[in-house]
Each structure stands twice: as C-alpha cells, then as structure tokens.
Amino acid sequence: MKILVAVKRVIDYNAKVRVKADNTDVDLNNTKMAINPFCEIAVEEAIRLKEAGSASEVIVVSIGPKACQEQIRTALALGADRGIQVETADYPESLNVAKLLAQVVRDEQPGLIIMGKQAIDSDNNQTGQMLSALLDMPQGTFASEVKLEGDKAQVTREVDGGLQTLSLNLPAIITTDLRLNEPRFASLPNIMKAKRKPLAVTSPETLGVELKQHSTLLKVTPPTERSAGILVNSVDELVEKLKNEAKVL
Amino acid sequence: MAILVIAEHDNSTLKGATLNTITAAFEIASKTPGSELHLLVAGRDCQSVAEEAAKVDGVSKVLVADDASYEHQVAENVANLISQLGKDYSHIVASATSNGKNILPRVAALLDVGQISDITAVESEDTFQRPIYAGNAIATIQSLDSIKVITVRGTAFPAASIGACVESNAEITNIDSPASSDLARFVSEEVAQSDRPELTAAKVIISGGRGMGSGENFSILEQLADKLGAAVGASRAAVDAGFVPNDMQVGQTGKIVAPELYIAVGISGAIQHLAGMKDSKVIVAINKDEDAPIFSVADYGLVADLFDVMPELQLKL
Ligand SMILES: Cc1cc2nc3c(=O)[nH]c(=O)nc-3n(C[C@H](O)[C@H](O)[C@H](O)COP(=O)(O)OP(=O)(O)OC[C@H]3O[C@@H](n4cnc5c(N)ncnc54)[C@H](O)[C@@H]3O)c2cc1C
C-alpha cells in the first residue's frame, strides 16, 4: 500500500509575522519558512507506518511555487520515498488544493492519505475534509491515534468533548492533530540522500484541473493590540485590583 | 432566500456555541435583504433539541432530520444531508467547533464552493473578517460563491437569547434523510465528565502550563476554580506532557476562549497560546520568569513561584 502525504510551505511557527504597510497582505520577505508543523506530523506518521511494514511507499506532494521543493526535500530527508510538486504561481485556496490533490490521488491510487489538520498561516482547517468529499472517501480528522487493521483504519480523534474513535474503510483520509506523534529530526546523511530521491514536477494543466477563484482577499490589518498592564507585588495587591479596579470578582 | 444554521447538540440539548452562531447568522441576515434563519437539527431522537431551538430568538423555522446515522455526527452522513438541503440557501453557517470544522468543509466541497472559516465579524452579506497567522493578522475576505459556507468563532459574537418572545416560536418541520453511507463507522467516545463550566462558555478560566509540573498539581487550580465557578484550561505543553486531557488545550489549534477573567499559571505565553485567549477581558499571569511573554498581554502580572502564591490566592479570593 502506498501512502500519500501532502505538505505545505508556511512561515516557521516561531517567526513573527508582519502586516504590510499598505494592508494588502502579510510581509513574508526574509521570513524563515518551514514545513507546516501538522504536515510534518503527517510525514512522520506515514514513515512510521512504512517502518512497521504497513506501507510500501511514502509519496509526498506539495502545491506551490518552486520554493516548496525545499519542504518536499525536508520530507524526503525524514524518510519519504519520492516527491511531487504541483507548480502554481502562489498558494491556491483550499478547494483548489483539494482538487489538485484529488487528481494526484486518482493517478497514484494510495491506500491512505495523511495531511495536517490545518496550516498555521491561513488557519483554515479545510483541505483534508474537502479532499475526502471530492473522492467520496471517509475522513478521520484531528487524529491522535491511527491503527491499520486489514482494509480499515481505526482513528482516534481529538474533539471538543474529549476523544472519539471511528473505523474508516480504506482508502481514507486522515488529518493530524498535535498528539499523533513527535516528528524525528533528519540526520545529515539522510539530508544528503534526500537530494538524490526522485522529485517530479507537474502542473494544474497537466493534471487537467481548472483552478477557480472562490474569494478575494480585500485587506489584511494588524489585530488590535492589548495595552500592557502592570506588575503587582503581592497576592493581596492582585486580589485588591481584581475586586476594585477590574471588578471581575 | 434563507440562511441555514447547523445546530450543534448531543441529541438532548442545544450546545451554547450554536447561540453565538445564530447571532452571527442574524447579522448576515440583516445585511441580506429578504432573508430569514432556518436551523437544522440533524441527530437521533433529537426532538427535545428541536423544541429548544424553536425558542431561540431570530429563528423562523427548525428543520429536523432524525436518523440513526446522525447520532454521532459522522461527517460523511451529515455533510451529505446538509449539501443536499443547502442548495436552496444563500448561506450555510456552523460553529467553528471540532464538529463544525469536521463537517462543513465537506459540505462546501460537495457544493463546489469555498469555505470562509472562523469568522469574527460580518461586514456585508458576502464579506467577513477572520484571523489568520494565529491571530497576528486579520483578513477581510469577500466570498465570490453563490452559496456561502461559513464557520463562526463563538467568542466574537454574543449568544442569541432564548424565549424572549414566547408567541413567536419557530415552526418545526421533519425532513427526509438521504441514504446513509458506511464509509465511516462510529466506534466509541471518551467524553470528559466535569461539573465545571465548559471552557468556551466560562466567565472565569484558570489555565495551567508546563510550570504546573504534574497532573496532580492541577488540583491547586481546580480548587480555586471550584471556589470561583471557573473552568480549568491548559497550554499545549501541559497536554503533551500528559498532565491533563486534550480537550483542555487553549490556543491557535485548541479552544478559543474569551472569558471575563483568564488566569494563566506557569504558562510562558507562546503566540500559539495567546491566539486562544488574548481576547479575554482581563488577563492575570503568574509566572516566576519576569521576561515571560505572557506578561506583555497581562493586565495584572505577578512574578512569583506559583506553588508559593496559589495557596494564598485560593485563601484570599
Ligand atoms: C503547530 C503548533 C500548534 C500549537 N498550538 C498550541 C495551542 O493551541 N495552545 C498552546 O498553548 N500551545 C500551542 N503550541 C505550543 C506553543 O508553541 C508552546 O510550546 C506552548 O504554549 C508552551 O506551553 P507552556 O507555556 O505551558 O510551557 P513553557 O513555554 O515551557 O512555559 C512554562 C512557563 O512556566 C513557568 N514556570 C515554571 N515553573 C514555575 C513555577 N514554579 N512558578 C511559576 N512559573 C513557573 C516558566 O517560567 C515558563 O514561563 C503549538 C505549537 C505548534 C508548533
């Protein structure tokens, strides 16, 4: 069984984002970029399934400009077998990403697709669910545990009330939550080896997918900042402030 | 045209988040001429939810789809129902809860439209604000789709009231359910039991981080919470370390909260945590490191060892 993993190039989770002065978007010039943390967890899960003998090949796909090959190489260094870049001018909306991935899935016929539950740039939390709908496959979103049993995947999901477990017919789509695993670090020899692993480049035209615009970004503004508060010196002072100044108690 | 709001419930009562979502939908309706609100209750033996929903102000019709396949809100079945029903609506709106996030993008794709996630303001019938980059920027987005599929951040809208005008209860209609799919099957769930208020609805929240040191030590926070009628939350680090369960995580990728009072104890204040609580009215931080970033958003900061000051705070509050 092949496993397909989708990865997105995003701002590093530690980097500070600035809004452009003209309020058209955020400014990512000279910002450190990385593989989206949830996608990294997806790559790790796929590699572990392969190491456990449940999968024969791990394919990693990224959609975006040439720069996203860097994130594909990172995934290859972690242990994925080959990469596919779908070259686009910028980063398409979720439904377009899902349509491109759906075509890759039809071509590659993986038994399992693993992706991050959300990208930490747009914070949309949509693409996995959309892909499942387009392919009429079951979805196991926000997964904290995945067990493969024959032609089924048992997925434990992090939900608002606690945990929910589903049994999905394969092929299925899984989106990762934070507790699914702790991704490994790539070793230097593996980073070197990753440079020689196959990486195919394709395009929406080759895949036969027409991208459609579903929304327009009108404006990006900074959030309202909280004004800095004060430091109190004792519990007594804190209690006094909460009661008499903030009046929240 | 009408707006379809998806009710969230446990087959017996309506979840509080739905009331905030109804307010957002009502704002959209007020900017969409000739619009009214319909509420969909999809569940199993969920008549009591429908009756409660019919009393919510602003709702003109309650649609009930009662079927075994909706008992656990399995996305494949619920999304099928909503997408078939949704073709006749201008907007489909759900709460940005784990359930809404699970189901609604599937609905959007089935209708071949995009989704606008987690809106925090309604500018017009098709234009909305939403936080991006962990709330470090606010995007204003215009939808170009004929059907607008939207999830709502509950903390950004007040709750709609229930039963202010008893005579105008909404009409309840039972609707047919499409054939169910067996692609996904519910196996089990572990629901945290607690007498404390729900995190997203609590007026006071006390959250602990890695600084708590252990799960046992969370009892220090629980005692104070019980005294104040507060909920207990946590940072990702506290959840990852196994101190407390995942449903207590506050943050960019956990729960978004905005209580009257948020007390952060032994939490450093990473942007991912701030994203989930910085809209709280009053923030208190207790941390032994005076350089911890949490102090930059706190109204009142106390630089101290939590194990020294929490027992005292418990006595004096
Ligand atoms: C993709 C992604 C998503 C994430 N999502 C979230 C999220 O939703 N929510 C979230 O919270 N985090 C999230 N994080 C993690 C976040 O980056 C931080 O790692 C996390 O919030 C840190 O938790 P903490 O403050 O408890 O731990 P630390 O950063 O380790 O801070 C512990 C604090 O406790 C203080 N302390 C220790 N002992 C004491 C004591 N005795 N008395 C007083 N103070 C003490 C220390 O001074 C320190 O400031 C995410 C990270 C990533 C990459």
Image (cartoon, rainbow, N blue to C red):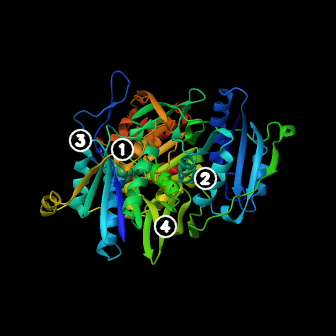
Q: To which residue does mark 4 refer?
A: A156
Question: Is B9 left, or right, of A138 in this rendering?
Answer: right
| Distance from the alpha carbon under mark 3 to that under mark 2 | 40 Å
In the rendered image, residues at marks 3 and 4 fall on the same chain: yes
**Quadrant of the image occupied by residue A3:** bottom left
Q: How crowded is mark 2: few (under 14 residues within 10 Å), some or many (20 or more)?
A: some
Element under label 1?
A: helix
Residue that appears at 58% across and 44% down = B203
**Which chain does the numbered disc 1 sit on?**
A
- Residue A37 drawn at (x, y percent): 33, 52
Q: Which of the labelled discs sits on residue A205, or is there none?
A: 1
Looking at marks 1 and 3 on the same chain, the residue that comes earlier in the sequence is marked by 3
In the rendered image, residues at marks 3 and 2 fall on the same chain: no
Q: To which residue does mark 3 refer?
A: A32
Circles 4, 2 touching at the beta carbon (< 8 Å)? no
Circles 3, 2 touching at the beta carbon (< 8 Å)? no
Residue that appears at 59% across and 52% down = B198
Element under label 2?
A: loop
Q: What residue type is labelled 2?
A: Pro
